[in-house]
Image (cartoon, rainbow, N blue to C red):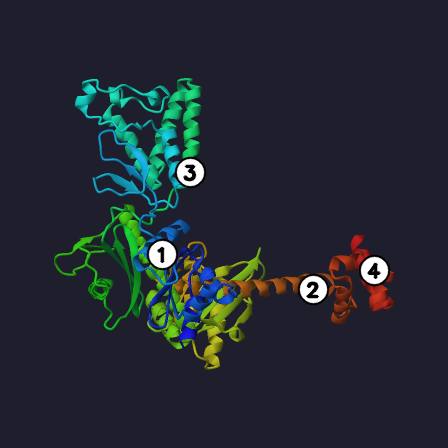
Amino acid sequence: MEQASLDIQIKTLPTSPGVYQYYDKDDKLLYIGKAKNLKKRVTSYFTKSHDNYKTKVLVKKICAVRHIVVETETDALLLENNLIKKHQPRFNVMLKDDKTYPWICIKKERFPRIFPTRNLIKDGSEYYGPYTNFKTVHTLLDLIKGLYQLRTCNYDLSQEKINNGKYKVCLEYHLGNCKGPCEGLQEENEYNENLEAIRQIVKGNFKDSLSRFREQMSDHAEKMEFEDAQRIKEKIEILENYQAKSTVVNPKISNVDVFSILSDESYGYVNFLQLSYGAIIRSHTAEIKKKLEESDKELLELAIIDLRQRFESKSKEIFVPFDVNVGEGLKITIPQLGDKKKIVDLSLRNAKYYRQERFKQIKIIDPDRHLKRLMAQMKKDLRLPEEPRHIECFDNSNIQGTNPVAACVVFKNGKPSKKEYRKFNIKTVEGANDFASMEEVVYRRYKRLLDEEQPLPQLIIVDGGKGQLSSGLKALDDLKLRGKITIIGIAKRLEEIYYPGDSIPLYLDKKSETLKVVQHLRNEAHRFGITFHRQKRSKSALDTELDAIPGIGEKTVIELLKSFRSVKRIREASKDELAQVVGVSRATKVFNYYLSKKD
């Protein structure tokens, strides 16, 4: 059972970047690794033969896989580093604390310096990072140096010392890399404006800097200062080409618990991220079964208390997506933007992935539970009076009014029931009239089901907007089925779902399973209808050409098409070529027919 469970865990892993953790039968952490593609990386452990003895031993001991999803491969590298230091798993190379990643520091001082460092000193300075190597840091600092003129000296630039003329400008000033604040040649306000722009660049937000540079470039161009305009243009190109750094860890977010929740009809999923000294040290998602239709707020409050006790958290602050009541003495923050909001979004993303994996696992292990949950969710999302165990979807197909046909596809328990698909030739409508065609096929379909005393569906979907829906509804009225079957329309472009009598459409969550089932129905109806329409158009094309020849029957037509492959080749063939296939008599009839057409 353990092995089966492990197999299912591996099969349902996401393909996103992240960190994976291997546990043994006693739930002891064995190994932590990073991956650009979690599923591909973890699967490789169990599909490849390993020459290394320790790797073989590790694989034999693995009984469970857990993971944390992140945005980028760099994020995974940084998170792996933090977790290995925290947990020190048996099979990982031990990382020493002095092997820390580099940061960019904006020093707390007048006319602040910007420089790289491995040491975070709590003196009020700002730190950005960490970065995976110094090359990235130097690239970014070179970019900043090329865009803005900043001082590099370590002088104490107090106003008093500047006024007293204590300092003289250095070579950096004469090279144009510094504007000389040491001699009072640059105002503090101007320097700080540049500093704010640099903060945004370090965070990956280039919008303000790009806007400022474009204005400067335009000003220089208007004044015919083309060299200066070209210089600014080069800065713009550098900024546009620069790839922003990753932002998994922010040293300002320290000793905080992060919680998020999403839920469906039956379960709530609460993710817990634990941050210590600006680093993620734990991710855990709890699945909570609803008993009395509890709200997300109620579930999250229960989970926060339980998870903090279970993991013995001492954090004095929590980040949550909405306000909660979890007792006094705990600071509650609801981030709206910035790095704090990003960390809450990351928590929610992990909850979503956990939920998706649980769906996949349940589908494999317990298909009945999966079906019950899906039907309950569809009933809720589509506002139905009962579960849609039997759904039928209609689609009209015609091209420029020719050969109008319609298709009806049937889904039972959320899956196609292809033996029950039905095709319709439109009988009472001339030309391309989708509304009248829809009314005809809906009426014919359910008139027949009623006459044959067959079970009716709980839900009818018509492919189209208000017009097609009204036509289908009229057919149900004629059969006195209004109110006995729910009918809705789905518009093609925006996935708008229309209900009878409602002018405003319903929009489902783009990632919801309900929308996926509805889209599958619509696409299947479209595919089935188009296939039938093509068959009918092909047959119609043959009817008008070969079947119009006097004295030529279906058998002769089939023989000719098998040999010549197309009507065009038959039309262009000589009498002798035709005679070799169908004999002189019938060949003469075909040849003379096309000869008369040429005249």
Q: Is residue 380 visible?
A: yes
What is the C-alpha distance between the residues marked 4 and 1?
A: 91 Å
Tell me: residue 292, above or below residue 283.
below
Q: Quadrant of the N terminus?
A: bottom left
Q: Earlier in the sequence, mark 4 or mark 1?
A: 1
Tell me: residue 184, above or below residue 210.
above
Foreground label between 2 and 1: 1
- Image coords of residue 178 (percent x, y): 32, 24
- Image coords of residue 255 (percent x, y): 22, 53
What is the C-alpha distance between the residues marked 2 and 4?
A: 18 Å
Q: Earlier in the sequence, mark 3 or mark 4?
A: 3
- Circles 2 and 1, Cβ within 8 Å, touching? The answer is no
Name the amino acid, label 2.
Asp
Q: Residues within 10 Å of mark 3 (few under 14, many from 20)?
A: some
Return the residue at label 1. Answer: 94
Q: Earlier in the sequence, mark 3 or mark 2?
A: 3
Return the residue at label 3. Answer: 242
Q: Residues within 10 Å of mark 2 (few under 14, many from 20)?
A: some
Q: Earlier in the sequence, mark 2 or mark 1?
A: 1
Name the amino acid, label 3.
Tyr
Q: Which mark is residue 592?
A: 4
Name the amino acid, label 4.
Asn
Q: Is residue 479 visible?
A: no
Q: Residues within 10 Å of mark 4 (few under 14, many from 20)?
A: some
Q: Residues within 10 Å of mark 1 (few under 14, many from 20)?
A: few
